[in-house]
Amino acid sequence: MSRIDELFAAAKVAREKAYAPYSQFQVGAALIAEDGSLHTGCNVENAAFPEGVCAEAGAISAMVLAGQQKISEVMVIADAALCTPCGGCRQKLNEFADKDVTIHIADLNGVRRSFRMDELLPAGFELEEKD
Ligand code: THU
C-alpha cells in the first residue's frame, strides 16, 4: 500500500534543509525501503558546481547506510512544474528499484505526476537481469 502522504510530508521537510546557494533551487527526496523504513535527502551544492549532490542521491545514501538496498516508493519535491530526477539520478534509482517502482513528483502543494521506474529510465543499464 502506498504511503504517499507520509512520503510527501517527509520530502517537504527534507527540501527545507537543502543547501542550494548557487541555484536557489531546493529539492527534497524521500523513499521507502523494502523493510518499510523511510529515508530522506536534500540537494547539497558546492562552489565547484559539478560537485553538488542531488536530493535523490542523498536519500539513497541514507537508505544504504541504514542497511537497506531495495526501494519500494519514491517522492521528489521542488517548487517547479515537474522536478523529475536528472539522468544520473535515474540511473542511481534504477540500481535499487525494480521496474515497477513508483516515483512521485510533487510541487509544494502535492503530487503532480507519478512515473514507473522504467518510464523514467527505459532500457536502463544493468549488469544482470532484474524483475
Ligand atoms: N536537483 C536535485 O537535487 N534533484 C533533481 O531531481 C533535479 C535537480 C538539484 C541539483 C541542483 O542542486 C539543483 O537541483 C538545480 O539543478
Image (tube, grey):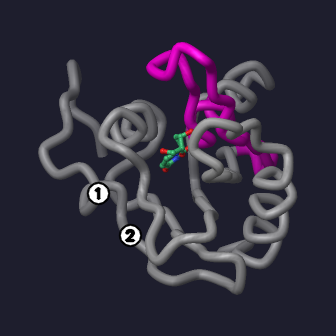
Horizontal placement of 104 versus 122: left or right?
right
Spatial separation of the CA atoms under disc 1 and disc 2: 7 Å
Q: Between 15 and 65, which is closer to the camera in this rendering? A: 15
Quarter of the view holding residue 110: bottom right
Q: Is residue 58 magenta?
A: yes
The amino acid marked with disc number 1 is Leu
In the rendered image, residue 9 lying in the magenta stretch gets the answer: no
Give the residue at x 42% y 60%: 84
Drawn side of residue 19 relative to residue 22, left or right: right
Residue 37 lies, in percent from the top left, at 81, 46
Measured from the top left, where is residue 11 in percent x and y? 75, 59
Image quadrant where one finds the N terminus: bottom right
- Is 121 above or below relative to 1? above
Query: Which segment did they paint magenta?
Result: 35-60
Task: Give the image quarter of residue 78.
Answer: bottom right
Identify the residue at horizontal 72%, vertical 40% (top origin).
Answer: 41
The secondary element bearing badge 2 is classed as: strand
Q: Residue shown at 47%/35% (left/top)?
A: 96
Q: Amino acid at mark 2?
A: Phe
At mark 1, the secondary structure is helix
Q: Which residue is mark 2?
A: 115
Task: State if disc 2 and disc 1 touch (CB < 8 Å).
Answer: yes
What crowding class fits label 1: few (fewer than 14 Cα within 10 Å), some (14-19), or many (20 or more)?
some
Question: In screen coordinates, is 57 left or right of 119?
Answer: right
Q: What residue lies at 63% left-to-right and 28% top-to-bottom?
A: 45
| Count of numbered labels shown in the rendering | 2
Q: Position of residue 48 (x, y in %)?
A: 53, 14
Name the foreground residue: 46 vs 97: 46
The residue at which mark 1 appears reads as 120
